[in-house]
Image (cartoon, rainbow, N blue to C red):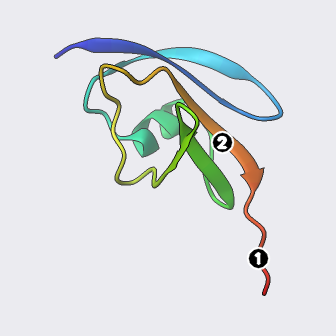
Amino acid sequence: MEVKTVRVGQMPGRVNEYAVNVGTSVSEVLELAELDPANKIVKVDNEAVNPDEAVVTESTNMILLVAEKVKGN
């Protein structure tokens, strides 16, 4: 399996690098980084994704948790 270095973090806050296998789910990478995606928008290379469905690819560079989702009307 190919290993990919991916930057993972939360805004505002920290961003660290992790070496993961290509094909690893985004939710597994967030768990490795000890980040909780609940009530957050998960972005992979600036595109919003479902962390349970998205996987790390050869072109993945960054996974970020951003602004809390707003519940309302």
Indicate the amino acid at tag 1: Lys
The residue at which mark 2 appears reads as 65
The residue at which mark 1 appears reads as 71
Indicate the amino acid at tag 2: Leu
> What is the quadrant of the N terminus in the image?
top left
Position of residue 21 measured from the top left corner of the image (x, y, whole percent): 29, 21
Classify 72 as above or below 59. Answer: below
Whether label 1 touches label 2, CB < 8 Å: no
| Residue that sits furthest to the front in the current view | 47
| Residue that sits furthest to the left in the current view | 1
Label 1: how many Cα within 10 Å (few below 14, some 14–19, many 20+): few
Q: Quadrant of residue 40?
A: bottom right
Mark 1: secondary structure:
loop
Q: Quadrant of residue 5?
A: top left
Position of residue 10 measured from the top left corner of the image (x, y, whole percent): 71, 35
Q: Residue at x 56, y 14 (%)?
A: 17
